[in-house]
Amino acid sequence: MHHAFSRSLLLLPLPLAGCGGDSNGSPPAAIVSGTIGAEGGSLSVTSGALAGASITIPAGALTAPVAISFFEDTASLVPGFVDVGPAVRIEPDGLPLALPGVLTLPFDPTRVPPAVTAADFIVRMRLGDGRVFEEPARHVDQALGLVTVDALQLATWWVSVPDEIDTRAYLPLNSGDFYVYDSGLRLTVAETRVEPNFLGIPLIKLTFSTTFAFFSGMYLVDDAAGALSLAGEFEIGAENRQERLDGAALILEPVEPVGASSEVVYTFTGFVPFGGPVPVYTGIAHTTVSLVERTSIVTPVHTFEDVVLLQFDIERSDSRPRSGTNRFRLWLANGVGPVQVQDNDNPPVRLVSGVVGGRPIE
């Protein structure tokens, strides 16, 4: 699963430019102003929300003196990204520079997701007509919270990064972890190499069990980097079956962007009863895996603020013949795992107790 975000022109609604000012509609005051001429020069903001912002215009970039001003503006939101710094509007908007100036923009390092690297930083530029462009960062100083970029015109600028997560931080899957939900549903995590029809293969076995002695779940395999692939599924109760994929299907990369989705298609072999030595049916499935959004979840245990919704939309059919569609949702809390679960349109069930990494969830 690979997610590539476009770095091309983005046609977005007209910005909320010129925001601020007082209640009678007067324009906002410039944070800092100065004049730069043909000989070049610099202008910097030393305090306030835009502290650290500056522009250095080289000699020859302008042909005559120009009054340049810095204003605080509003960023244009782009799904799948986090705006980590203030929007800096530099006027006169759209003024071209014959030679590139060096623009420095501040950002808040605490707002950068842990999985983001310096190479992921993006500088967005919005013109007065609402068009938004992306520019590569020239340098990123994550300690000081400053990004530099080449600027060939004056506009509104801000710093964005992909909204990415370390998937195993949100889905730890330690052997021995377990979760109990308010419906009586229980999820357990176990490492095993002795599952029938998977003998010798290291698996992470996720088992959902109910108070009615109904068990179902999935087999996952992981790699050293933390990627997760689906290897099979099982059900003990209504159908007493076990399924093995003909080839493990990658469902989550070690790092995933929130808001993205991917599709996997795989074939499988079914054994009835569970673990039977002879295949009974074959099938095919089309699954869409989505990290839908960031949210917060209130449970009897705790209010979890840093939560990502993981959703599986599954279409499947087999040679018995049987077919159907299912939706399964897991709300994953950072450092904890699934704190809320929903199967199809049934009411979500919330975490009431559990253990992760040998420690009770509090």
Image (tube, rainbow, N blue to C red):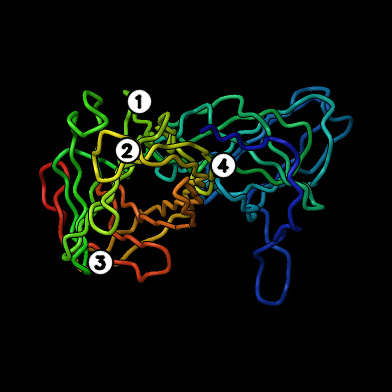
Image spot of residue 26 (x, y percent): 73, 69
The reply to whether callout 4 and callout 2 are in contact (CB within 8 Å) is no
Give the residue at the far bottom of this rendering.
24
Whether 346 is drawn above or below 160: the answer is below
Can you tell which mark lies on residue 168? 2
Check disc 1 and give the amino acid type: Ala
Mark earlier in primary sequence (1, 2): 2
Task: State left or right for residue 15 relative to residue 209.
Answer: right
Mark earlier in primary sequence (3, 4): 4
Image spot of residue 247 (x, y percent): 42, 28
Q: Secondary structure at mark 3?
A: loop
The residue identified by callout 1 is: 225
Whether 296 is drawn above or below 11: the answer is below
* Badge 1: residue crowd in 10 Å (few <14, some 14–19, many ≥20): few
CA gap, disc 4 and disc 1: 26 Å
Task: State left or right for residue 290 relative to residue 114.
Answer: right
Can you tell which mark lies on residue 160? 4
Mark earlier in primary sequence (3, 1): 1
